[in-house]
């Protein structure tokens, strides 16, 4: 008797983590964006995106086709690489690789980099493309739709997931369903831009429209063929950037100049809408192959949100008996239907409703829920005035730990520094400042010029201006210390690095 080997299709999760989440300022900043923040529970949105893949292989075992779920590929801003790696370590999850974008170029180039990585060794998995900053509460429904999508994607469809709407939302783009493909999927009839209120109500009433989720599934080779034919410049520049890139331990660094030359475009605009709109009369010369590309949409009812504004965070969060969502040290009196977040001090409210109040160590933001989408415009004003509050929190994270500015004055600055066990700062020197270090807990190994010595708890040392130095934590507990800087210039760019284990 002849035995036929069972064919197993690989599903390669691809997590796109390049967004900055400016509508969730002041919690979300460029250097610490919303996908890295625990907005809806104990885990960050990125961690939740990875964790919702747990059990997917078991869900797949009930289908006619057999699927194997690979460790995720992550495409991210270079600035966030160590934060992402650390967050995955915290939840004990491995990853295939973190591909680093030197600049943001939207989702189509990011997916092209991931697809090139997926086929690098001759494989051709089904890509499961997920933004890192969404909330999905019904994991069973999500996983069932993923398996339905994988079956279509393995037959060379480009699949997207449309969220079944429950309100006349004007903040999302929509997808109109076309003819049925099978019992769970439709051809894509049309992509529709964000509607006005009355149009959104018509869409909801018709039952033919879905919210555009930004999640996709397709074979890696199918995407590469599609982007090559639909947006060849994206394909060529991404391919050059990937081919001329290099491995850096857990990271893959694409070649900068090629990727910086890449057009910026979304998956929808670059490919999906062109496929949907492709008819013989609409095709330009040389675009005949677009007709061979098949697109599908699968309705998804999984309690989804892109958490695109503070009001949407209020909607998906647990509310108390007064309709308030409260996080941190907050007191309320006669307060209703509001989102109140305090990260640093006591927040107290009296006689307000339908408001958003968010307090951090260096900023307070107050808005009505009806104007939550306009927080992005507020951030634009902060950028225009060349302030730094849109970039970093008062606590700044580094691969070795973090630092927080405690006090600043004329020619001095005080910082609290935390160094993780086994970590070390770069061997460096400053032209304009000297530093005094006081160890609060743990033990510091200090290199100062030609000296190497230990500084224990309640001890201190001095680093003169212009002297090479390095701080290390060779112990088993975090090193906590106070740094007092003094000098004519105290900016973070007054650092000359001679050696750095993190490649900065």
Image (cartoon, rainbow, N blue to C red):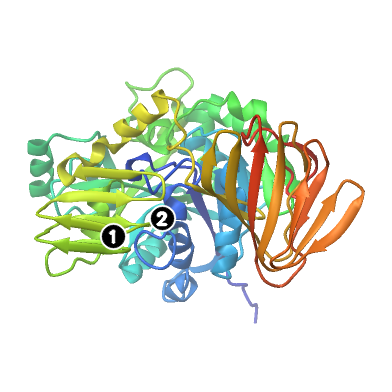
Q: Secondary structure at mark 1?
A: loop
Across and down, in percent, residue 264 comes to: 48, 28
Q: Which mark is residue 447?
A: none
Earlier along the polypeptide chain: callout 2 or callout 1?
Answer: 2
Q: Is residue 497 left or right of residue 485?
A: right
Q: Secondary structure at mark 2?
A: helix
Q: Which mark is residue 152?
A: 2
315 or 113, which lies in front? 315
Pointer 2 with pointer 1, Cβ within 8 A? no
Q: CA distance from mark 2 to mark 1?
A: 10 Å
Identified at 58% across, 47% down, the residue is 414
Across and down, in percent, residue 314 comes to: 23, 56
Q: Is residue 24 left or right of residue 319?
A: right
For disc 1, the marked residue is: 184
Residue 472 in the image: above or below residue 233: below
Q: Quadrant of residue 86?
A: bottom right
357 or 21, which lies in front? 357
Identified at 8% across, 43% down, the residue is 201
Q: Is residue 176 visible?
A: no
Q: Residues within 10 Å of mark 2 (few under 14, many from 20)?
A: many
Residue 380 in the image: above or below residue 25: above
């Amino acid at each position: 008797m002849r035995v036929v080997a069972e064919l197993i299709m690989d599903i390669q999760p691809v997590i796109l983590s390049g967004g900055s989440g400016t509508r969730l300022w002041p919690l979300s900043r460029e250097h610490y964006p919303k996908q890295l923040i625990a907005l809806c529970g104990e885990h960050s949105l990125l961690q939740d995106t990875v964790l919702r893949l747990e059990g997917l292989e078991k869900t797949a075992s009930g289908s006619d086709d057999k699927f194997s779920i690979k460790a995720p590929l992550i495409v991210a801003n270079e600035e966030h690489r160590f934060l992402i790696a650390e967050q995955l370590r915290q939840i004990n999850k491995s990853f295939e690789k973190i591909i680093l974008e030197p600049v943001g170029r939207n989702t189509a180039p990011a997916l092209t980099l991931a697809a090139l990585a997926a086929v690098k060794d001759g494989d051709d998995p089904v890509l499961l493309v997920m933004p890192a900053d969404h909330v999905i509460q019904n994991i069973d429904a999500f996983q069932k739709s993923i398996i339905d999508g994988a079956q279509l994607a393995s037959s060379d469809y480009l699949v997207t997931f449309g969220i079944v709407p429950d309100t006349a939302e004007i903040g999302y783009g929509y997808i109109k369903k076309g003819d049925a493909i099978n019992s769970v999927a439709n051809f894509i009839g049309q992509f529709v831009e964000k509607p006005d209120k009355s149009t959104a109500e018509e869409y909801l009433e018709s039952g033919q429209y879905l919210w555009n989720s930004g999640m996709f599934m397709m074979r890696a080779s199918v995407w590469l063929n599609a982007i090559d034919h639909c947006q060849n410049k994206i394909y060529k520049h991404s391919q050059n950037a990937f081919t001329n890139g290099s491995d850096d331990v857990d990271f893959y660094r694409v070649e900068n100049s090629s990727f910086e030359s890449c057009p910026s475009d979304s998956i929808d605009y670059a490919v999906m809408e062109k496929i949907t709109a492709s008819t013989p009369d609409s095709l330009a010369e040389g675009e005949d192959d677009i007709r061979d590309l098949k697109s599908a949409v699968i309705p998804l009812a999984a309690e989804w949100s892109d958490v695109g504004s503070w009001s949407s965070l209020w909607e998906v969060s647990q509310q108390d008996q007064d309709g308030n969502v409260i996080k941190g040290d907050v007191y309320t009196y006669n307060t209703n239907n509001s989102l109140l977040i305090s990260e640093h001090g006591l927040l107290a409210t009296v006689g307000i409703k339908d408001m958003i109040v968010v307090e951090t160590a260096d900023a307070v933001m107050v808005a009505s829920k009806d104007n939550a989408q306009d927080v992005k415009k507020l951030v634009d004003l902060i950028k225009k005035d060349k302030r730094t509050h849109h970039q970093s929190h008062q606590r700044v994270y580094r691969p070795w730990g973090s630092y927080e500015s405690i006090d600043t004055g004329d020619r001095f600055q005080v910082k609290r520094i935390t160094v993780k066990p086994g970590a070390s700062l770069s061997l460096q020197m400053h032209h304009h400042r000297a530093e005094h270090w006081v160890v609060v807990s743990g033990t510091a190994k200090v290199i100062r010029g030609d000296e190497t010595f230990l500084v224990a708890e309640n001890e201190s040392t001095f680093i003169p201006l212009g002297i090479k130095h390095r701080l290390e934590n060779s112990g088993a507990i975090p090193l906590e210390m106070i740094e007092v800087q003094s000098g004519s210039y105290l900016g973070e760019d007054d650092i000359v690095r001679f050696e750095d284990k993190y490649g900065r």
